[in-house]
């Protein structure tokens, strides 16, 4: 299967947060799954670091090392992501999460998220 991590799930995972479900950890660690992190998530992390809303143990460069260590691929933005984004219902107002939703739909990925607003989107594959 192919999964797209929501930003907070990625942060919980790399920080060893105990609130992340064991099933989620197993999916991410499974060598037979394709795991993606949106470039939008990296952008969101950097913005939140810059404005003081998020602290990481290391600098942003460590994110790329962690992605490589866990075999998590970066999902770039494509033209059709924006077409889906523009037609997406306004259930969720966060622009980062809306783009992650759009990418999941466009690329037929299952989103791993605990965000209840994301979970309210119909026809979205969720873990």
Image: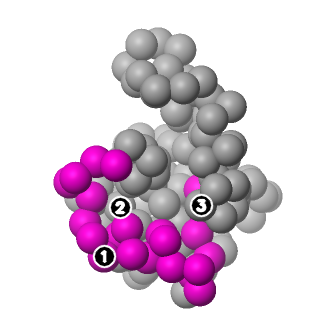
Quadrant of the drawing holding the C terminus: bottom left
Residue 52 to residue 74: above or below: above
> Which residue: 51% across, 79% down?
30
Question: Closer to the N terminus: mark 1 or mark 3?
Answer: 1
Question: Closer to the N terminus: mark 1 or mark 2?
Answer: 1
Residue 19 to residue 2: above or below: above
Quickly name the residue at label 2: 113
In three-dimensional space, the C-alpha distance between marks 3 and 2, rounded to whole angstroms, equals 18 Å
Which quadrant of the figure has residue 69? Answer: bottom right
x, y percent for residue 123: 41, 81
Q: Answer left or right for 66 relative to 111.
A: right
Quadrant of the drawing holding the N terminus: bottom right
Residue 50 to residue 22: above or below: above
Say what secondary structure mark 1 lies in.
helix
Residue 107 to residue 4: above or below: below
> Which residue: 53% across, 56% down?
100
Highlighted range, magenta: 16-37
Quickly name the residue at label 3: 70
Residue 65 is inside the magenta segment = no
Say what secondary structure mark 3 lies in.
loop
């Amino acid at each position: 299967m192919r999964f797209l991590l929501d930003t907070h799930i990625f942060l919980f995972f790399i920080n060893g947060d105990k609130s992340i479900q064991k099933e989620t950890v197993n999916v991410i660690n499974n060598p037979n799954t394709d795991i993606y992190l949106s470039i939008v998530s990296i952008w969101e992390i950097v913005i939140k670091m810059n404005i003081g809303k998020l602290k990481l143990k290391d600098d942003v460069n460590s994110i790329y090392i962690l992605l490589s260590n866990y075999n998590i691929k970066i999902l770039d933005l494509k033209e059709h992501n924006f077409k889906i984004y523009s037609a997406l219902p306004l259930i969720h107002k966060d622009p980062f999460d809306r783009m992650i939703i759009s990418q999941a739909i466009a690329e037929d990925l299952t989103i791993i998220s605990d965000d209840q607003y994301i979970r309210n989107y119909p026809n979205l594959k969720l873990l």
